[in-house]
Image (cartoon, rainbow, N blue to C red):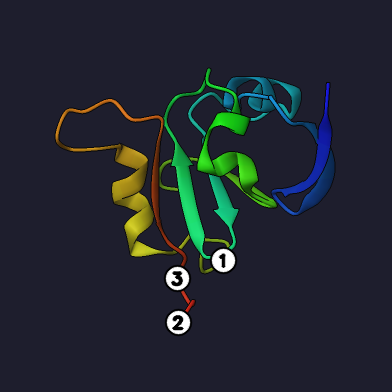
C-alpha cells in the first residue's frame, strides 16, 4: 500500500494513499461528527462520502487536513471561511456528491 505524508490538525503523519475519512477518523480517534476538510493548493474540499478512498477525490491531493466539528471555534482562516459552513452541509440541490470544493480564502488570482 502506497503512503504519503500530510499534516492532519497540525501534526505531520504518514497516511495510506487510499485511506477513507472513516479510516482516518478511527485511526486518529476523532469524533464521529467531525468533518474532514482538505487544503489542496488554492482549493478547500469538504468530504461527504466517508467511505470513498481519498485518492479518488480532490481531497486526496491535499497536503493539509483538518477535522472540524459543528459549532467548533475557528482555528485559522481556512476554518473561518464563510463558505465552509455551506460546504459542510453538502449540496442543497439534493444531488449526492462525494465532496464540496471552494476557493481557499486569502488566495488572490
Residue 5 found in image quarter:
top right
Judge depth for marks 1 and 2 and give the one in front: 2
CA neighbours of label 1 inside 10 A, class few (<14), some (14 to 19), many (20+): few
Residue at the spot 84% in from the left edge and 42% down from the top edge: 13
In the rendered image of this protein, does residue 64 appear above or below residue 60?
A: below
On the picture, is 105 further left or further right than 39?
left
Give me the residue at 73% from left, 31% from top: 17
Give the residue at x 67% y 52%. 64
Q: CA distance from mark 1 to mark 2?
A: 18 Å
Please say whether residue 68 is visible from this viewpoint: no
Say above or below: 103 vs 54: below
- Which one is closest to the eye, mark 1 or mark 3? 3
Image quarter for residue 75? Answer: bottom right
Return the residue nearer the eye: 50 or 4.
4
- Which residue is identified by label 3? 105
For numbered disc 1, what is the local secondary structure?
loop
Q: Which residue is mark 1?
A: 76
Q: Residue 15 bears which disc, if any?
A: none
Measured as percent of width and height from the top left, residue 95 is found at 21, 28
**Residue 7: percent from left, percent from top:** 75, 50
Which residue corresponds to the image point at 52% horizontal and 36% vertical from the top-left?
Answer: 57
Residue 84 appears at what percent x and percent y? 38, 54
Which mark lies nearer to you, 3 or 2? Answer: 2
Q: Which residue is the site of mark 2?
A: 108
Which of these two is toward me, 58 or 36? 58
Q: Earlier in the sequence, mark 1 or mark 2?
A: 1
Query: Where, quadrant-wise, is the N terminus in this rendering?
Result: top right
Amino acid at each position: 500500500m502506497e503512503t504519503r505524508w500530510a499534516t492532519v490538525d497540525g501534526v505531520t503523519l504518514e497516511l495510506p494513499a487510499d485511506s477513507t475519512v472513516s479510516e482516518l477518523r478511527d485511526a486518529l480517534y476523532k469524533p464521529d461528527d467531525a468533518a474532514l476538510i482538505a487544503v489542496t493548493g488554492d482549493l478547500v474540499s469538504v468530504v461527504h462520502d466517508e467511505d470513498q478512498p481519498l485518492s479518488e477525490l480532490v481531497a486526496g491531493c491535499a497536503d493539509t487536513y483538518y477535522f472540524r466539528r459543528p459549532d467548533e471555534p475557528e482555528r485559522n482562516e481556512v476554518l473561518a471561511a464563510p463558505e465552509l459552513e455551506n460546504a459542510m452541509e453538502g449540496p442543497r440541490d439534493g444531488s449526492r456528491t462525494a465532496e464540496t470544493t471552494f476557493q481557499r480564502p486569502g488566495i488572490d488570482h
